[in-house]
């Protein structure tokens, strides 16, 4: 599934582009923000996470491991995969940013996505961690469902999750207000994304999803129609219809895209998503997502520390190459000296 790393790179690139857009020239900034690249990137990650996590659980289930062993193995893999970089970032930010101390508990307990319910805004530091909290909360119950229930009932639960999500968004839209960020951050509002990815994993595991199968062809058709409806709702309709059904449509589209990537792209898409640099960026995408939110603030702090002009080094054609270089250094160091070494300990828990 080499091209799935390309999908990861595309998704994290959209998130970074939106979060760093404030320093771009006005016309370019408005263009980037008009497409909600950050939101789409996160939604793509949700579908991909549901797909891959469910495949891992189903493979473990096929090995007929005892339930406790299979569940423990899954959580050990998750802990060694996500905790080292995440908690290292929290520790560093605790000392770098005084504002982090007030919200550290929310982040440390993976409750960042619930912070907006009480404060009407994202956390002042680490606000983008909300999506990681959503995934971690999903991991608390979904492995139990997959490992305990037969495949048919897992599919029913996934379908129920897909139906619950738009209902949840509608209820929050009506009770919290249409522009309240919790409409997007509460875990139930993302279940159609996560559960649709999971349902595709069940189909792939059970009957396969090769390029020429009837399921795949139908999925590609549905995905294209979903993309068309999404664009109409986003640019022409908006309002409650988009707020409630927008994510369901992106779930269908990104689901089709992920299945196509899992089978391997052809033509020009293969050259892009199979490019070594793109694949490598997808490999380190977790670190890119974690660290990108703090790089601009640290950059400004370094300018002040070394007495460098913010006017000169704030020019976008100087600032952005330096920001990208800084992000790549931090993320690469995290991946090769922290994340990858930590994963090697998985062999002791097999």
Image (cartoon, rainbow, N blue to C red):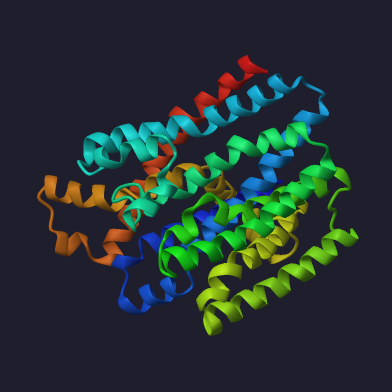
The x and y percentages for residue 37 are: 49, 65
> Can residue 163 be seen at all in this image of the molecule?
yes
Number of numbered markers: 0
Q: Name the residue located 86 percent from the left edge and 59 percent from the top edge.
A: 215
Q: Quick check: 108 left or right of 275?
A: left
Q: Is residue 260 above or below residue 280?
A: below
In the rendered view, does 114 fall on the left or right side of 81? left
Farthest-out residue, top: 348
Residue 292 lies left or right of residue 1; in this view the side is left
Residue 50 position, x and y percent, is 65, 47
Residue 255 position within the rendered picture, expressed as x and y whole percent measured from the top left: 70, 58
Q: Residue at x 39, y 32 (%)?
A: 87
- The image quadrant that residue 314 belongs to is bottom left
Q: Position of residue 112 (x, y in %)?
A: 41, 45
- Which residue is depicted at the point 52% across and 79% down? 238
Q: Is residue 131 above or below residue 321?
A: above
Residue that appears at 58% across and 42% down? 138
Identify the image quadrant of residue 310: bottom left
Q: Is residue 292 left or right of residue 170?
A: left
């Amino acid at each position: 599934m080499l091209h799935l790393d390309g999908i990861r790179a595309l998704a994290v690139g959209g998130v970074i582009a939106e979060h760093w857009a404030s320093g771009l020239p006005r016309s370019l900034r408005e263009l980037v923000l008009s497409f909600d690249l950050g939101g789409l990137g996160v939604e793509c990650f949700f579908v991909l996470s549901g797909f891959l996590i469910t495949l891992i659980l189903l493979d473990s289930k096929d090995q007929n491991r005892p339930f406790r062993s299979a569940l423990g193995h899954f959580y050990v893999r998750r802990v060694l995969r996500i905790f080292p970089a995440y908690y290292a970032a929290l520790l560093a930010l605790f000392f770098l940013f005084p504002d982090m101390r007030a919200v550290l508990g929310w982040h440390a307990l993976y409750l960042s996505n619930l912070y907006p319910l009480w404060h009407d805004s994202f956390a002042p530091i680490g606000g983008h961690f909300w999506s990681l909290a959503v995934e971690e909360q999903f991991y608390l119950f979904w492995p139990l469902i997959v490992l305990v229930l037969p495949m048919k009932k897992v599919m029913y639960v996934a379908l129920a999750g897909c139906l619950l999500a738009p209902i949840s968004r509608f209820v929050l839209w009506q009770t919290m207000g249409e522009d309240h960020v919790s409409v997007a951050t509460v875990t139930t509002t993302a279940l159609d994304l996560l559960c649709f990815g999971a349902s595709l994993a069940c189909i792939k595991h059970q009957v396969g999803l090769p390029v020429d199968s009837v399921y795949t062809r139908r999925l590609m058709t549905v995905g294209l129609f979903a993309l068309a409806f999404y664009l109409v709702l986003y640019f022409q309709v908006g309002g409650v219809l988009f707020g409630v059904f927008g994510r369901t449509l992106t779930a269908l589209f990104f689901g089709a895209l992920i299945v196509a990537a899992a089978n391997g792209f052809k033509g020009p898409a293969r050259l892009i998503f199979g490019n070594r640099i793109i694949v490598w960026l997808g490999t380190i995408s977790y670190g890119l997502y974690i660290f990108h939110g703090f790089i601009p603030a640290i950059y400004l702090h370094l300018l002040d520390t070394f007495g460098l002009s913010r006017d000169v080094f704030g020019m976008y054609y100087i600032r952005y190459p330096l920001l990208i270089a800084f992000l790549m250094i931090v993320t690469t160091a995290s991946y090769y000296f922290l994340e990858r070494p930590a994963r090697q300990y998985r062999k002791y828990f097999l």
